[in-house]
């Protein structure tokens, strides 16, 4: 059941949550492929729900589909290039198999950024639908597959533009992703960091109401879910009608009976007020894991990025979190090679990684995005130098992580089974499983027969990359 906020069904009623129209009613089959961040993963689930409700058949393979929707990301140049080559690839696969060409649609951030331009040139697509207009998809796909819209009707085939009322609710029955149900709590972003395209593709920040969020999570719990990940570009900036901030919201969500764990992504360092950290530390259900991207360790670069904090403030936040949130862990994003970043600035970034000791760091080379404020600056760090800085930062991160991970050997942790491990490389001991701790550490265990969602304690014997290797304790 995917819907808009003004039209919320009572998802706690199992009958309603499970009602689906019969399949095979003559409407098209649709394959959805998702790129980018977790918000796109959630949106794809919402699109899936909207289309299934309308009677479309959602399929898991592109060659089975009449319609292929690519839910895209614009955050870096490379992300967009991938989509152009994917469109060519999808068309080529059909030519090779002699199956009819599919309708190809682009949704998500690229649709919003490029609009009608995606309907030009060799790699043009049939349909462009931006992030706030997925409710138009059933009607449009019906017309496109019935061929009642002319191939030249560019206006009809391009639906973009921001709408503050568009808050999707993805069907709880489609989840979870790794045992955690994603729940988008607001959309857009008002921060306008100078390098970032998101405020333009996702529009201004707009909150889903607390009632809608609580109803959605109650529906998830009624369907057997025990864990949610609250999503937004800056969840910590959540503020419903100036009356309910993120701290109050998580208090309310934590009241939901049967819900066991609450995670959230992404936090902005500026919003990590002591009061919020106190609340996170106090509420047992809220997981002690903070993804608070620092981007750079240099105050000069942070100012030019318009990140609204400095390195000292960030480190104070980390120190306070350690004080009030037991077992807290941190993860981050870094950008290297921002315009004007000197070697000294970069050394400050390395210093930040060493000081905070992040569990995970997602590191990116700066990529100029059209129309953002930083595009006016000279992209003066040569690509070779960006590559070198990226490699050095990754090496420092690995070194810090190895030291932190080694110190964990011998400890006993509690984790929840998320599913089978990706690599089943110890078959003699039976299947391998992936557990996740509240503070977001992965543990791989071998042997045994586990149920997804079950909780176990494991002794940590070692680690491999970012996963710990453990042994279940009786
Ligand atoms: N809202 C989050 C994340 C936004 S996008 C935040 O404020 O941190 C995810 C990550 O992509 C960012 O944290 C940043 O590290 C990276 N990113 C965004 N724009 C980029 C660009 N132009 N070039 C390289 N990396 C970028
Ligand atoms: Fe982009 Fe900054 Fe908004 Fe994050 S806070 S989405 S990096 S503008
Ligand atoms: Fe990418 Fe859009 Fe998410 S640009 S990171 S898919 S908000």
Image (cartoon, rainbow, N blue to C red):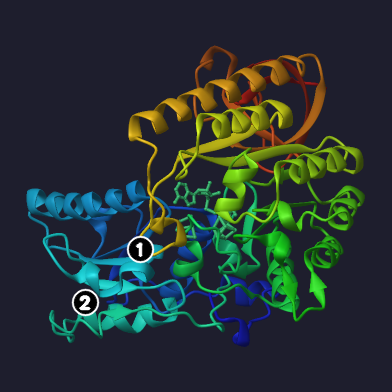
Residue pointed to by mark 1: 110
> In the figure, 46 relative to 195: above or below?
below
Left or right, 266 with respect to 201, comes to: right
Instruction: Look at the numbered discs 2 and 1 and tell me whether their residues touch, using CB distance below 8 Å.
Output: no
Task: Say which residue appears at 60% left-offset and 33% top-offset.
Answer: 349
The mark that comes first in sequence, 2 or 1, is: 1
Which type of secondary structure does the marked residue at label 2 adopt? helix
Indicate left or right for 337 with 241 as reference.
left
- Report whether residue 430 is seen: yes
- Whether residue 74 appears in this view of the structure is no
Front residue of 242/88: it is 242
SS at circle 1: helix
Residue 5 sits above or below residue 259 on the image = below
Q: Nearer the viewer, mark 2 or mark 1?
A: 1
Label 2 sits on residue: 145
Give percent across and percent down for residue 186. Answer: 63, 69
Quarter occupied by the C terminus: top right
Which of these two is toward me, 462 or 434?
A: 462
* Residue for point 25% across, 57% down: 64
């Amino acid at each position: 059941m995917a819907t808009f906020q003004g039209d919320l069904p009572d998802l706690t009623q199992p009958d309603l949550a499970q009602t689906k129209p019969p399949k095979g009613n003559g409407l098209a089959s649709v394959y959805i492929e998702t790129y980018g961040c977790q918000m796109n993963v959630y949106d794809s689930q919402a699109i899936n729900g909207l289309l299934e409700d309308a009677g479309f058949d959602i399929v898991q393979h592109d060659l089975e589909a009449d319609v292929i929707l690519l839910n895209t990301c614009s955050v870096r140049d490379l992300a967009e290039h991938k989509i152009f080559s994917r469109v060519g690839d999808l068309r080529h696969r059909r030519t090779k198999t002699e199956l009819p060409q599919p309708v190809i649609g682009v949704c998500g951030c690229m649709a919003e950024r490029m609009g009608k331009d995606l309907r030009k040139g060799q790699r043009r697509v049939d349909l462009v639908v931006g992030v706030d207009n997925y409710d138009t998809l059933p009607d449009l796909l019906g017309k496109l597959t019935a061929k009642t819209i002319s191939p030249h009707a560019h206006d009809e085939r391009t639906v973009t533009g921001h709408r503050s009322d568009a808050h999707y609710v993805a069907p709880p029955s489609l989840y979870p992703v790794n045992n955690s149900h994603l729940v988008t709590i607001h959309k857009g972003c008002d921060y306008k960091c100078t390098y970032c395209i998101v405020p333009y593709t996702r529009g201004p920040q707009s909150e889903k109401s607390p009632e809608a969020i609580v109803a959605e999570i109650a529906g998830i719990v009624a369907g057997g879910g025990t864990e949610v990940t609250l999503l937004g570009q800056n969840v910590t900036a959540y503020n419903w009608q100036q009356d309910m901030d993120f701290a109050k919201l998580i208090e309310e969500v934590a009241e939901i009976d049967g819900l066991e764990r609450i995670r959230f992504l992404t936090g902005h360092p500026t919003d990590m007020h002591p009061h919020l950290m106190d609340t996170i530390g106090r509420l047992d259900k809220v997981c002690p894991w903070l993804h608070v991207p620092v981007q750079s360790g240099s105050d000069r670069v942070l100012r030019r990025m318009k990140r609204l904090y400095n390195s000292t403030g960030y480190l104070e936040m980390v120190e306070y979190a350690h004080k009030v949130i037991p077992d807290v862990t941190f993860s981050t994003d870094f950008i290297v090679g921002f315009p004007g970043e000197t070697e000294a600035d970069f050394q400050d970034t390395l210093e930040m990684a060493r000081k905070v000791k992040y569990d995970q760091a997602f590191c990116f080379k700066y990529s100029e995005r059209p129309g953002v404020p930083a595009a006016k600056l000279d992209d003066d760090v040569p690509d070779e130098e960006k590559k070198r800085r990226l490699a050095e930062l990754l090496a420092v991160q690995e070194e810090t992580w190895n030291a932190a991970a080694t110190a964990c050997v011998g400890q006993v942790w509690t984790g929840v089974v998320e599913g089978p491990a990706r690599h089943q490389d110890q078959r003699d001991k039976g299947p391998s499983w992936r557990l996740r701790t509240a503070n977001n550490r992965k543990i791989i265990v071998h042997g045994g027969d586990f149920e997804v969602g079950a909780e176990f304690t494991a002794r940590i014997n070692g680690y491999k990359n970012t996963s710990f290797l453990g042994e279940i304790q009786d």
